[in-house]
Amino acid sequence: MKALKERILKDGHCLPGGILKVDNFINHQMDPILMKSMAVEFVRRFASTEINKILTVEASGIAPAIMVGYLLEIPVVFAKKRKPSTMENMLVTEVFSFTKNQTYTICVSKDYLQSGDKVLFIDDFLANGNAGKGMIDLVQQAGAELVGMGFLIEKAFQKGGEALRQTGIHIESLAIIESLDNCQIKFKE
Ligand code: 5GP
């Protein structure tokens, strides 16, 4: 998606270890106009897919997810990174975070992810695919169906995209980065 790639080049910053910082428009300050355009693009790309629920993970997936849910007029559920003591009836999985170098217990209430749901997972980044794999597990536990995954930014030099596509899931990434070597942002054409 041209507008996103241009914004990444203008305002994105590389950090050592293959991390792209997009705090100016996605991860801290957020640009709602761009966020809306990205959601419109997801809706276009998944137009032929039947979806009744958007699933994401807190915190950075929530903004793009709610934009897509708003456009499709369907509920948005975010998986929580800590099991609330007040909540029973949870589906639980483990996800290793690449940026935080830490394993999280991720959970969703069985009330909000159920058999028969046709789920689109939305997140900001696809790196090693650990969040995506955790979501596959949660959706399977619920007896729901994962009909697609949409990422704002995919880092193709990490292996998540390849692994998730091999499962046959419909995956869409709005900007695919081939390399961040020497702090140069290079997109896949
Ligand atoms: P994965 O689960 O695919 O290994 O990693 C995806 C998650 O890690 C995303 O939800 C995102 O929060 C975080 N992440 C991975 N790589 C980057 C990156 O280069 N920049 C930022 N800002 N977050 C990243």
Image: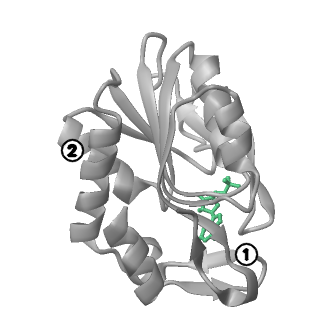
- The reply to whether residue 130 is in sight is no
Which of label 1 and label 2 is nearer to you? 1
- The reply to whether residue 182 is in sight is yes
**Viewer-closest of 5 and 106:** 5
* Amino acid type at image mark 1: Gly
- Tell me if residue 105 comes above or below residue 128 in the rendering: above
Q: Is residue 77 left or right of residue 48?
A: right
Q: Which mark is residue 70?
A: 2
Q: Is residue 166 left or right of residue 120?
A: right
- The answer for how far apart the CA atoms under marks 1 and 2 are is 32 Å
Residue 65 in percent (x, y) is at: 37, 49
Secondary structure found at label 2: helix
Secondary structure found at label 1: loop
Q: Do labels 1 and 2 touch, CB within 8 Å?
A: no
Give the labeled residue for mark 1.
Answer: 18
CB at mark 2 closer than 8 A to ligand 1? Answer: no
**Viewer-closest of 188 and 14:** 188
What residue do we see at 61% from left, 38% from top?
107
- Tell me if residue 116 comes above or below residue 97 in the rendering: above
Q: State ligand 1's quadrant.
A: bottom right
Q: Is residue 156 left or right of residue 25?
A: right
CB at mark 1 closer than 8 A to ligand 1? Answer: yes
Quadrant for residue 42, please give it.
top left
